Amino acid sequence: MSEERIEERDERPGRFSGFLGGVRLLFDGVLFLFVLFFIGFAVFASGIEREPRETVREADGITVLTGGPDRIDQAMKLLAEGKGKRVLITGVYRATTKEELKKLASEGGQYFACCVDIDKEARNTIDNATETAEWVAQHRFRSVIVVTSNYHMPRALAELGRVMPSVVLIAYPVIDKNVYLERWWTYPGTTKLLMSEYLKYLPALGRLGLTRLANLLLGRDKVAETAPEP
């Protein structure tokens, strides 16, 4: 047997070991990302507010992202309390009338005639943010109270912060009684909802980060407060 064949045979175990090492490295990387993903999900779920806000600071305007009747009711209560000058209800179904929306408000119904704007173009949270940004620019507002469900608030703030980096966003989460956040992992429906929201929140957070980085590189790095405590 020639020396060349012996050398070729000796190299094979080394190549196989290198292949196994690459597979092991890939497996470890995937496992690390998998663990990181679920740690992030646990942090996300644990960080959702469980108790309603008793007070909220005043702002120029109030934007409410539709999706539940309690959201509009809470936004109109804030307007009636003088917490904002105007309300934008964004994402309203096109066939819904102003009178139907008015019935959802236990307080402040009289303000629909003067101080409520209705957006029927938005179909998702990104659209909500775009429509709100245009409304804020139109009225030259510098601060906005954001009213939406507690589990939806992180994504809403991320999308709004991306298009309005210089506007102060004040979170006013509406507590959804049908979402059981205490021991959420024991409720399949709540777990599914939170996971769905988390999967949508991650890209929103990524878009926010890239926008801030771009603004920083371009010298437009002025970022306002986001979701400050009252």
Image (cartoon, grey):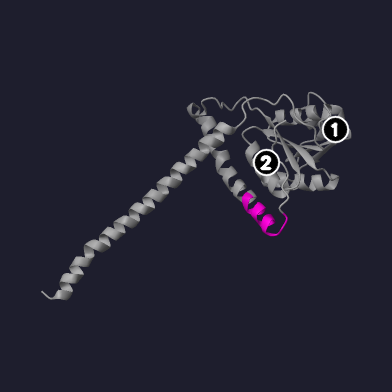
Q: Which residues are magenta?
A: 209-220
Is the C-beta separation of discs 2 and 1 under 8 Å? no
Asked if residue 215 lies in the magenta stretch, the reply is yes
Circle 1: element type: helix
> What percent of the width, then of the height, locates residue 7?
19, 71
Label 2 neighbour load within 10 Å: few <14, some 14-19, many 20+: many
Q: Residue furthest left?
A: 1
Instruction: Return the residue at label 1.
Output: 112
Q: Amino acid at mark 2?
A: Leu
Q: Earlier in the sequence, mark 2 or mark 1?
A: 1
Looking at the image, residue 194 sits to the left or right of residue 163; the answer is left
Residue in view at x 84 percent, y 45 percent: 140
> What percent of the width, then of the height, locates residue 23?
34, 55
Instruction: Return the residue at label 2.
Output: 157
Circle 2: element type: helix
Looking at the image, residue 109 sits to the left or right of residue 70; the answer is right
- How many angstroms separate mark 2 from mark 1 (CA)? 25 Å
Residue in view at x 52 percent, y 28 percent: 184
Q: Quadrant of residue 62?
A: top right
Asked if residue 132 lies in the magenta stretch, the reply is no
Residues 66 and 49: in front is 49
Residue in view at x 67 percent, y 45 percent: 159
